């Protein structure tokens, strides 16, 4: 149990650090693509809202899936989304 808590702390630190690294650059990229400031705010708010809404549902699956599998799935999903953000440079302007 103790190792699971340590992993959760490490993964939380890493994911928040990754989010913190793209947060200052993403609005600049959005503005370059012609996306308004309102939509940038909505995009960032959606991340926080999705975290709050999904947390109780994820908690229900911890015992079924297992802590390590859930953490690994979360890391994979977050990494995939961050890689998709990297492809935004290839998108055409709005």
Image: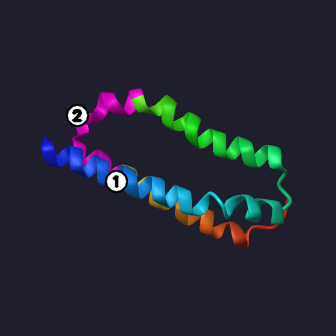
Q: Quadrant of residue 25?
A: bottom right
Q: Quadrant of residue 86?
A: bottom right
Which of the image's four quarters has the N terminus? Answer: top left
Question: In the visual, does 73 lie left or right of 66?
Answer: right
Decide: few, some or many residues near mark 1? Use Cα within 10 Å; few <14, some 14-19, many ≥20: some
Question: In the visual, does 81 lie left or right of 36?
Answer: left
Name the secondary structure under disc 1: helix
| CB atoms of marks 1 and 2 within 8 Å | no
For marks 1 and 2, the one nearer the N-term is: 1
Can you tell which of label 1 and label 2 is closer to the viewer? Answer: 1
- The residue that mark 2 highlights is 64
* Residue 11 badge: 1
- Residue at 54% x, 36% y: name it: 50
Which of the image's four quarters has the C terminus? Answer: bottom right
Q: Nearer the viewer, residue 59 or 2?
A: 2
What are the residue bounds of the magenta stretch? 56-73
- Residue at 42% x, 32% y: name it: 55
| Cα–Cα gap, marks 1 and 2 | 20 Å
Residue 81: tell me if it is visible.
no
Q: Position of residue 75 (x, y in %)?
A: 38, 55
47, above or below 21, in the image: above
Residue 87: tell me if it is visible.
yes
Q: Position of residue 73 (x, y in %)?
A: 35, 51
**Protein image colouring:** rainbow
């Amino acid at each position: 149990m103790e190792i699971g808590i340590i992993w959760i702390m490490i993964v939380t630190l890493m994911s928040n650090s990754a989010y913190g690294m793209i947060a200052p650059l993403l609005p600049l990229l959005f503005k370059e693509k012609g996306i308004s400031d309102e939509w940038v705010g909505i995009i960032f708010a959606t991340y926080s809202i999705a975290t709050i809404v999904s947390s109780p549902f994820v908690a229900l699956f911890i015992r079924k899936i297992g802590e390590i599998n859930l953490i690994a799935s979360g890391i994979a999903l977050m990494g995939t989304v961050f890689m998709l953000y990297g492809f935004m440079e290839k998108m055409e302007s709005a």
